[in-house]
């Protein structure tokens, strides 16, 4: 079955360590994509998705401006982040690992997301169906050219390199 990612009910978040003592989260508010789900043979399933990098928000304008700059996402040069799966491997009855090509800041690397199927629901606004997925992965932002860091007097990094990506996806069945 083919599904469209519902941008209004999908959450794309990232989080990094701040001062190595706390976590700061951000999100991308504009996402689009398609999913093909083969419930009988999950290895035939796939996903293609993209986010608008300028839609980044942490709730703090000064931080958002810095994250949109060339130090991080460089939204002027790289307006989208894309993911295209290359492999789906079932790990449990409602879980799988989705591996694919993540392109960010013009650099592509293979990454994996642990994905849990949250179920189906009849769409209350149409005759269609919806599905829910939760996908989580971690990347090192330096792999994508994001080397900015400020080391404070005590030798503490201002921003960590490991970045957790969490996707709460709701998709609508295509007619």
Image: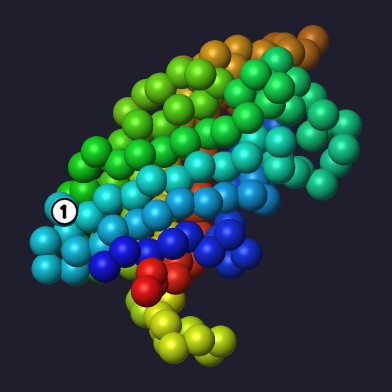
Q: Residue at x 57, y 42 (%)?
A: 51
Q: Residue furthest left?
A: 41
Quadrant housing residue 129: bottom left
Residue 10: x and y in percent read: 56, 61
Q: Residue at x 68, y 26 (%)?
A: 75
Q: Which colour scheme is used?
A: rainbow
Q: Nearer the viewer, residue 160 or 100?
A: 100
Q: Nearer the viewer, residue 126 or 51?
A: 126
Q: How many marks?
A: 1
Q: In this view, does 169 lie above or below 105?
A: below
Residue 130: x and y in percent read: 43, 76
Q: Nearer the viewer, residue 73 or 146?
A: 73
Please indicate, yes or no, whether residue 65 appears anywhere in the rendered image: yes
Q: Residue at x 16, y 53 (%)?
A: 44
Quadrant housing residue 41: bottom left
Question: What residue would you read off at disc 1?
Answer: 44
Label 1 residue SS? helix
């Amino acid at each position: 079955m083919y599904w469209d990612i519902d941008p209004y009910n999908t959450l794309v978040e990232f989080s990094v360590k701040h001062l190595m003592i706390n976590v700061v989260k951000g999100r991308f508010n504009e996402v689009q994509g398609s999913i093909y789900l083969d419930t009988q043979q999950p290895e035939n399933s796939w996903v293609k998705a993209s986010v608008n990098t300028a839609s980044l928000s942490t709730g703090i304008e000064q931080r958002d401006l810095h994250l949109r700059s060339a130090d991080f996402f460089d939204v002027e040069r790289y307006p989208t982040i894309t993911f295209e799966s290359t492999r789906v491997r079932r790990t449990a009855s409602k879980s799988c690992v989705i591996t694919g090509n993540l392109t960010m800041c013009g650099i592509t690397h293979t990454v994996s997301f642990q994905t849990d199927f949250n179920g189906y629901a009849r769409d209350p606004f149409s005759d269609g169906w919806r599905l829910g997925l939760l996908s989580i992965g971690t990347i090192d932002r330096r792999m994508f050219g994001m080397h900015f860091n400020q080391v404070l007097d005590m030798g503490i990094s201002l921003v960590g390199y490991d970045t957790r990506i969490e996707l709460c996806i709701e998709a609508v069945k295509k007619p």
